[in-house]
Image (cartoon, rainbow, N blue to C red):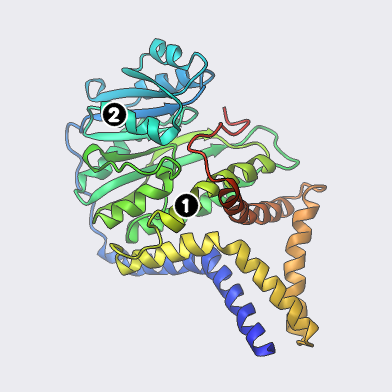
Amino acid sequence: MRTALEVVFWVSVGLIVWTQVGYAAALAALDWALQARAKPAAPARPMPPSLSLIVAAHDEEGVIAAKVHNALALDYPGERLEVIVACDGCSDATAELARGAGADVVLELPRGGKIRAQDAAVERAHGEIVAFSDANSLWDAGAARALVAAFEDPRVGYACGQVIFVGPAGASHGANQEGVYWRYELALRALESRLSSITAGNGAIYATRRDSYIVVDPIMGHDLSLPFKMVKRGLRAVYVPAARASEKMVPSLAGEFARKRRMMSHTWPILLRGGMLSPRGYPPGYALMIVSHRLLRYLTPVLHAVALAANVALLALGAGPLYIVTLALQLTLLAAAALAGVLTARPLLIARYYVLTTASPAAGLWDWLRHGTPASWEAAEGTR
């Protein structure tokens, strides 16, 4: 019994360490070993391909004009750029303001969710490349050119850029620590992109070839669905850090937890019935990336719970001092997260961020199993 519990405990701990730290270290080592074999980038075409920039919006009257102005100000040939705003059941002045700001096409659609609004916009698009952005995301002037340049490689079917989350000035008590996590995630994404393909994108700045666009279930967002589906089609999904966008961070950790919980309620259907876990069509290395960066990351709350329960059971059976130390470390993490509600020290806030965001996959799974996942949602408070 004790031996079995020790195996369960150390396997759980090992998988947590692998998905949180070991995986990144392994990618970095492999990337370093292969750097000498890297090929120079292909020169960009003198005239970039035609581009349709699509913004799906639901009641975004507060930001839509600024978004359209931002799109029209991009360093991209005006005659080759088309700006499409797809209004998803808007009940405010989003459509009117988008037209007034100069959008080329404004679609007024019944509420069907972001994905269906994007589908409708792609049907109307004329660009060789279709790019997507959120209404509250602002692109750097050179972002479109940088993003589109990825498609000079005919093997690339999907490209996403770098989104920078801007926090509220003077945030302290309960402040969201998303920036810390996101910098680490972007470093992983760069490594995955150089070695194979990324395992997830982001909704602020990404693009596909129009003839490679994939229609997915409306509850299964593009961020997670498109990269692995492109790989299954024999294409690459890449990360382009030079294509930069910015958007407001959710100001509170409670708000960030709610946002990630909602995202995870869309993630589990992709994972369990959307084809992500099927190895068919994956190169072996990419299959390992999916397991390491996606499956194990989403199972982390279960692994933590199993490790804690096994640790307590081992001590009840008279296990040695080592297991007193491991239990103390686990309880210290939980205590630090709890104290962050009272003290605003950065290490405590990071511990609280880790605990709550690690719990979000379990909360999202519970939501999906209990009442399903709607195709539409409201913008997170404080991000507009």
Residue at left 52%, top 22%? 59
Disc 2: CA contacts within 10 A as few (<14), some (14-19) or many (>=20): many
Residue at left 80%, top 53%? 339
**Residue wearing tag 1:** 269
Q: Is residue 275 visible?
A: yes
Nearer to me, 213 or 42: 213
Determine whether 381 is above or below 189 in the image.
above
Q: Residue furthest front?
A: 371
* Amino acid beneath label 1: Pro
Q: Going by the image, does 129 lie left or right of 340?
A: left
First reached walking from the N terminus: tag 2 or tag 1: 2
**Residue wearing tag 2:** 52
Nearer to me, 93 or 73: 93
Q: Residue 137, how many percent across, how many down?
A: 47, 31
Disc 1: CA contacts within 10 A as few (<14), some (14-19) or many (>=20): many
Q: Going by the image, does 198 lie left or right of 180?
A: left
* Residue mark closest to the camera, 2 vs 1: 1
Q: Residue furthest right?
A: 342
